[in-house]
Amino acid sequence: MQPGRALGAPSTETGDMSAEHYDPLETRDPAAREAALMAALPAQVRAAQAVPALAEILRDVDAGAVTSRAALARLPVVRKGELLQRQQATRAAAGDGWDPFGGFSALGWRAMAARAGRPAGRVYQSPGPIYEPEGEGRDYWRTARALFAAGLRAGDLVHNSFSYHLTPGAWMMDAGARALGCTVFPGGVGNTELQLQAMAELRADAYAGTPSFLRILLEKAAETGVALPHLKKALLSGEAFPGSLRDWLQERGVTGYQAYATADVGTIAYETAAREGLVLDEGVILEIVRPGTGDPVPDGEVGEVVITTLSPDYPLLRFGTGDLSAVLPGRCPTGRTNTRIRGWLGRADQTAKVRGMFVHPSQVAEVLRRHPQVLKARLVVSGEMAADLMTLKVECAGGAEGQAGLADALAATVRDLTKLRSDIELLAPGSLPNDGKVIEDARSHR
């Protein structure tokens, strides 16, 4: 495997750009895909164990034994908060302990590059701040596949309105578009009139950026009488893309599709012409876990998106994105055979402050672990300011009947874990909504 190139990333030869699919990987037998992904895991665990932070986290793990989803699920989840904490600690360290990436990256400069033999091509800053490395290689962030699914082809001019400043968003789209053989105009953000002028005079075929800024551009074009007859395609990310805006764009001649990507792991999933969820990228392993835990949930249940990348450069294993989604059943009607997800459904970090104490989703998960007869739980915080009330709603096997003493036991467990009192409501299986919420803040002051 080439440095910086994940399993499932295309070679330099991407095949026929007039075809319906980007490459043969998209239509392979799901069992063959799963076998390839699982076969790649031991090498990825070894790559992770070669960087300081993950060597510590995975010190007791036999890399050769991680060959299944069950084995993967036994590894700890690394969440953005831990990434930030480790980065802050190692950025403050002296001497050889200094590491702006918190010990998670095989890339860097000076001594870090010498350690792995691979320099970082670029480094970015996201809010926190969290720093992300970029390695060498064509389409490093794996965005070409998403752009292709949005209809972009070699020879198109792409007007890229993601920010080229600090964060990697623009560079992710830039690299993918150029890998397709497109020409890129680096519009960045702001300067609406100048960007609109460039779109018109250069006759841009496609737009990459946030959906809200594309709307601003098209509204300004209508207001000023600027025609954009060539602009037909768009790949949108960074914000929610509701159906109402999709239809609004279509009425103005622009067909927009969405991509789900993060600065930590690159492209995760992308929309297709079927408009039925988002198809997973070929270079990642997806798990949906119960918020606050590392426990995978059944397909269809909403939970936190956890991603394992297959690049040795930034070998994040079980990275918790903090986003909620769910697996959709069946295959994409376009012929792509990879797993589909529902898209972004909210945030998994549902920590609430109740009567001066923080209550975390992991504490609710611990309640379930201590009481196996509880199938699902949701902690509802209600009341007025300074008069907070907690109610733990739980689904029980067999319903509320025959559960004598369970409510008292649950109340005691909640008090033990949170130091707070809670009412208990026993429910039949299937009573709680499938929205991924473990803690619902229903207070009137928000």
Image (cartoon, grey):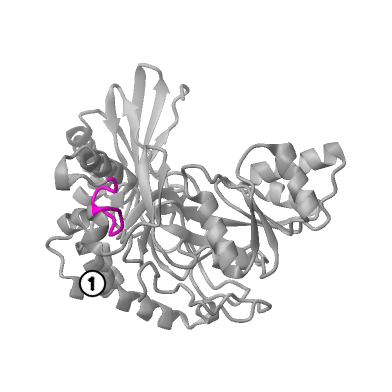
Asked whether residue 146 is in view, the answer is no
Q: Write the start and end of the magenta stretch as one range.
A: 100-110
196 in magenta: no
Q: Residue furthest right?
A: 225
Q: Left or right of 363: which side holds 143?
A: right
| Res. 100 image quadrant | top left
Task: Relative to 405, say whether 321 is above or below.
Answer: below
Which residue is pictured at 27% across the width and 58% down the height? 113
Task: Relative to 153, say whether 314 is above or below.
Answer: above
| Res. 420 image quadrant | top left
* Label 1: element kind: loop
Task: Relative to 382, say whether 348 is above or below.
Answer: below
Image spot of residue 87 (x, y percent):
27, 43
Q: How many marks?
A: 1
Image spot of residue 155 (x, y percent):
70, 68
Q: Left or right of 138: which side holds 369?
A: left
Look at the magenta stretch and give its main secondary structure.
Answer: loop
Amino acid at circle 1 = Val
Task: Relative to 181, say whether 352 is above or below.
Answer: above
Which one is nearer the viewer's eye here, 373 or 179? Answer: 179
Which one is nearer the viewer's eye here, 133 or 33? Answer: 133
Q: Which residue is mark 1?
A: 66
